Every structure is written in structure tokens, then in C-alpha cells.
Amino acid sequence: MAAVCRTRGRDKALAGSGPMRPREAAAVHRFRAMNSNFSTYGLSAADRKKAESWFAFVEANLSRFRPDSELSRLNRSGGRPFLLSPLLYEVLLQAEQFYRTTEGLFTPYLGKTMEELGYGGSFEELAEWGEGGAVGQGSLQERELEAADQAADHRGSGSAGQHRPATTRPGGVKAPLLNAGMRSVVLGGETAVDLGGIAKGLSAARLARMLRAQGVSAGGLDAGGDLALWGGADRVWEVGVEDPFRPGTDRFTLHPAGDCGIATSSAWKRRWKSAAGRSLHHILDPRTGQPAGSDLVQVTVAAPDLTQAEVYAKCVLILGSEQGMAWLERRGAALSTVGIRRDGAIVQGGRSIRITEGGREHG
């Protein structure tokens, strides 16, 4: 998940219509976790410390880049039953549920494919490799040509109780054998799990629920571009979304109301070159096993649940503007999406959400 969705301005994330003390509104805290930039908004010093500790714990257990993490140990389990911690079980179960409800369009089982494509280490490590490593943004024309080439290349490729029987999935991946009673899993075949963005989204949503239960009435969490915002139905937020063609500049501002989750998926972040010099990115189309080559370069989804927003943003990006918007609208009336195409045009789908560009109403 790319860190392209962020709060706009100094304290705008908490600039809502509901009451808030100035000290709360000024509490913005930034730190690094999970190879991304994280921020908290409106939290006390004690709660900021909780946030840093929580995300460090999640990274230590769910990162595929750390050989000592629980996820890495699972991926080395070689088809043997593996007892899961409550955290990994929760994330893996939700990921499997989304795999099923999206009919495989979202999948956490492409870990080996990612490695084969060259994304076997953190993006910071890729950036140090030089040839075959991370690539810069390049010119707009170069990026559009690369995306068009990729699209042409790929267009033709086109539960609780006992262990469930394994079923073969696209690419030879087999369904994990989850056992709720034992809280265990068996990975089939050559399967390797890559939890990526869903780990950030789910962990941020879970922390937001914990803070609310502890009496934090309003606040925000930005987990590398996945935002969990809460503060009551009368609060209207301002969330700046970065222009993929002009890094560091907001393309538009979203104005969602009430409690929500917002996630952005981008094909222009986390890019690298293969050993053959081919430009790649980390949003894979599971139907081809290759980087997605649709007409969309970035998608933002707002939803009642952050984990849902994170998963659906990726699915819409893979499908493209026409199919993706139609697909999302079939998912529910409470979902909003804003996409940016390769030609720079903004497209919207789902529930209407207020958007401004340069202080002016969009559309």
C-alpha cells in the first residue's frame, strides 16, 4: 500500500465541525513503521506511545521482510500444521474471507510471485540495489508509455471447525487449511503469504477500536496511507490525496463525514526494475501474476471499515475504471471511490463524496 493518502495541512485531519479542544487538534505525531510513514492525529502522548508500540509489534510479527517474524516462519513451515498467534490468525482469516468474497481478485497468497519478480526485500533494500533495484518517478510521458506497454503485455493473460479440504487456485496456489479450534493453518503447495497492505489497514482499524473503547472520542491514524478516522457523525474531515504524477503535491481533497476508513492504492509507488530492466510495481493482478496494467494508476476508496477500503482500492485498480467502478457499486451503497487514470482524468464511483481541487468543487 502506497503512502499517498494523507491529511492536508498542519492539523486539518481534525478540523471538523464537531467540538475539539485546541490542544487535541494540534497533536500530530509522525513516525516510521512497517517500511512506511505513519501519523497519529489528536492523540495524547500516552496514546501516541501506544500506537508506536502496537505497530512495532505488528511489524515484528507480520512482515515478510523479517526472517524472524511469525509470518516468515509460517512461510517456511513446508506444509506442516502451524500454530498461529491471535494476531496472525485474525489477519489471515480476514484475508482468506476477502479472497473468497472478491473471487480471488484480492489474494494474500502471491508471496513467492513477488519474490520471483524481484520484490523479495523491503523497498529501502531495493533502492540500494542499483541495477534491478528501485526506480524513480520518471517523466509523465515515460510513465504513461511504460504503463501502456504493461497493459499490452498482460491483456492476453489473462472457516471454523475441522480443516477444510485443499482446493487448487489460480497459479497452482492451494487454499490454506485453517483450523479454528486449534488456531492453526497448513499452507499448501508452494504457497507463501504476503499480507502487505491488509496488515496495515487491519491493524490501524483494530487500534482505532481499542482507543475508542478506552475513551478517545476523536482521532485519526495514518498507517502508510491507510486512514482510520473517528469523531462522530457531525465531524467533516479534510484528507489530501497525492497526485501520482507530481509527488508531494495534493491532487484533490476528500471531505468525508463521520467515522470512516480511507485507503489509496497506487501503481506509481513501490516500483523497481527487473534484472532485464523492465519497470515493475507491487500491485499484482492475480489473474496474470504480473503487475496490474489497467487504465488506472491510483485509486482511493472510503468505506465504513478501513480493511474493506484497503482491499477494494486494490481490486478497483486491478480492474480499471470501467469494470472497477461497476464492480465496487455491486459491493454496497456505503462505498465511495475516486480514481486517477493514466491520462490524468479523475473518475468517481459508488456513493457520492465531496471532492475539491485547489479549493474548488470538483465536477
Image (tube, helix red, strand yellow):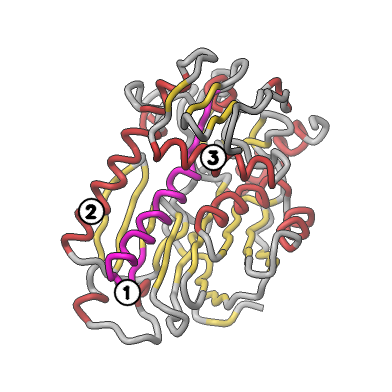
Residue 71's disc number:
none
Marks 1 and 3, the one that precedes in the sequence? 3
Residue 217's disc number:
1
What residue is disc 3 on? 93
Marks 1 and 2, the one that precedes in the sequence? 2
What residue appears at the point 43 percent right and 47 percent down from the top-left corner? 200
Amino acid type, callout 2: Lys
Residue 210 is a magenta residue: yes
The location of residue 247, given as percent across then percent down, is: 46, 54
Nearest-to-viewer mark from 1 and 3: 3
Provide the residue span drawn in magenta: 192-220
Disc 1 is placed on an element classified as loop
Q: Main secondary structure of the magenta part?
A: helix
Q: Is residue 184 visible?
A: yes
Disc 2 is placed on an element classified as helix
What residue appears at the point 40 percent right and 69 percent down from the top-left corner? 8
Local packing at callout 1 (Cα closer than 10 Å; few below 14, some 14-19, many 20+) is some
